Amino acid sequence: MQKIDSLDTLLVEQLRDIYDSEKRLTKAIPKLVKAATAEELSSALESHLTETQEQVSRLERAFSLLGEPARGKACAGMRGIIEEADEHVGEAYEYDSLRDAAIIGAAQRAEHYEIAAYGTAITHARLVGRDDVADLLEESLNEEKAADEKLSEVAESCVNMDAMSGQNEDDEDSDSEDRSERRSDRSMHATGNGARARSTRRR
Ligand code: FE
Ligand code: ZN
Ligand code: FE
């Protein structure tokens, strides 16, 4: 194993870690797309998959700018985040919208981890005078931040609302018409689960 003797070497090591993360994500995101129910969520994940593939090639360009072979080094952090995502997706959910909410949580953990990794690598690239590499990485960082914000939007605008209305559907009959309209719009979950929702409700 090569000794890390300079910030330049450390930068390359970090790029290898990020390269591995991104490649893992190109395999993990399609599984999340499959498990997602809300159209808005699957399309957000799909468009980030396309960006992730572009981020992989961007890293290959960064390696070539640095005169290094594009080689990944197993990222234990991302491997763990993806393992957890698989676990969360595989749980039993009363409503599909609850699984969607869990998928968003898992995807946002991945985004935040990437944001941290790119942030550090960009700082190091600038410190060693490689603005060309830093600029490239910054394009990816901006995509990660936008993906994270988009996921928050999806959670706020549709998924979490539906998960809540599912839980509360037996409390408030007065506006149940509104809610069933909203539900049928998205065909998120079956009706008539009030009793089970009540027994599993947690506050
Ligand atoms: Fe990424
Ligand atoms: Zn890592
Ligand atoms: Fe990402």
Image (cartoon, grey):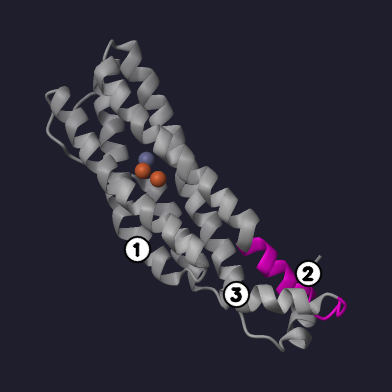
Identify which amino acid the numbered label 3 is placed on.
Answer: Asp
Q: Nearer the viewer, residue 5 or 52?
A: 52
Observer-side mark, 3 or 1, equals: 3
Identify which amino acid the numbered label 2 is placed on.
Answer: Arg
Where are the magenta residues, as a range? 159-174
Query: Percent x, y for residue 62?
Result: 21, 28
Instruction: Give how far apart the Cα atoms at labels 3 and 2 are.
Output: 26 Å
Q: Nearer the viewer, residue 169 or 11?
A: 169
Element at label 1: helix
The residue sitting at 57% across, 78% down in the picture is 187
Question: Quadrant of the image for the N terminus?
Answer: top left
Element at label 3: helix
Q: Which residue is mark 1?
A: 30
Q: Is residue 63 left or right of residue 137?
A: left
Counting labels gives 3
Q: Quadrant of residue 159?
A: bottom right
Q: Is residue 25 left or right of residue 70?
A: right
Please check the rendered image and state whether residue 16 is part of the magenta-colored stretch, yes or no: no
Query: Percent x, y for residue 92?
Result: 57, 78
Q: Which residue is mark 2?
A: 202
Instruction: Give how far apart the Cα atoms at labels 1 and 2 are.
Output: 31 Å
Observer-side mark, 3 or 2, equals: 3
Q: Which mark is residue 77?
A: none
In this rendering, does residue 46 appear at all?
yes
The residue sitting at 73% across, 67% down in the picture is 164
